[in-house]
Amino acid sequence: MEAFKFIDMYFHSQHEIVDIRETESRDINTLFSYLNNLHSLSDKIKEKFDIKLSVHPEFKLLRILRNYFHHVDDISELRIYVNLEHNVSPYHVEQMIIPMRVWAEAASNFVDKNTLPESHEKYKNKQKFIRKEFDAILNICDCVDILDDPKLYCHPLLLKCDGSISELGFDIFKFVYNISNIIAEECRKIPELASKKIIQDLGESYCINNNIPKHDLMVSPGVECVLTTTGYIYPKTIEPAI
């Protein structure tokens, strides 16, 4: 059997979840399998090659979602193409959207799992760890309100847009795409991994220079753009959903 099979398993699931041509191959297990393969690769590549994926904000975010998925509740993702309007330019044309509420619940679960009683000697250290992880995520993800107090957002986040109720969405495509480029570059630095066929077959696009930035949508002034669980919408009126 080919060595370091965990690399093959990761890029197989990554290809299935990211490549538009694999649309028909996806099912209810695709996201769960991807997150578990990412988690497994992180453990093994650290043990065998001292590569720490955990330093990257994309991995931190996906790990929080994976742990929520694995220990707390299911996550349903919605795959759609970006709905474009005039004077709107995206960095990627396909999205992996989950409800914003689910991201808040995952972040809240992370806080709960890492919070000790104030009387505990490690209480302050744990609070610093939580803040450090969230601050790193904010370098790649514009969700400061949710990470300041996740529990406030653990309910359907609804807006009334042009008279219709819409739930806010959270796109995780960027984080999957970026961490895959990071993993590819790390593998190319190690002869045993660089020589693997699956790494050699990766295209030149798998590089950190192609990573999607924090703000991944260019919108002209005056254009209102809201990400919902059905994709981007461009409402003329936005009101609270009471």
Image (tube, rainbow, N blue to C red):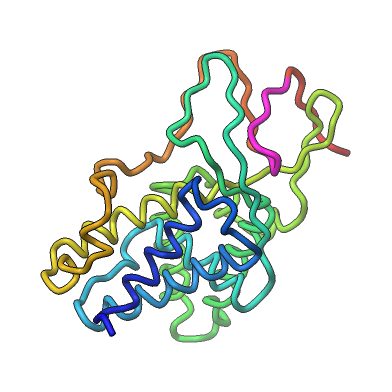
The answer to whether one can see residue 145 in this image is: no
The answer to whether one can see residue 88 in this image is: yes
Q: Nearer the viewer, residue 97 or 213?
A: 97
Residue in the picture at 55% in, 81% down: 116
Q: Is residue 233 magenta?
A: yes
- Which segment is the magenta one? 228-235
Tell me which corner region of the image, top left, top right, bottom left or bottom right, holds residue 162: top right
Q: Quadrant of the C terminus?
A: top right
Q: Where is residue 68? Give x, y as percent.
A: 60, 71
**Left or right: where 150 falls relative to 206:** right
Q: Nearer the viewer, residue 197 or 206?
A: 197
In the figure, 88 relative to 53: above or below? above
**Left or right: where 68 falls relative to 195:** right
Residue in the picture at 61% in, 29% down: 83
Residue in the picture at 81% in, 32% down: 160
Q: Where is residue 5? Give x, y as percent.
A: 32, 78
Q: Is residue 64 magenta?
A: no
Q: Quadrant of the N terminus?
A: bottom left
Q: Where is residue 190? Give x, y as percent.
A: 13, 69
Q: Nearer the viewer, residue 104 or 234?
A: 234
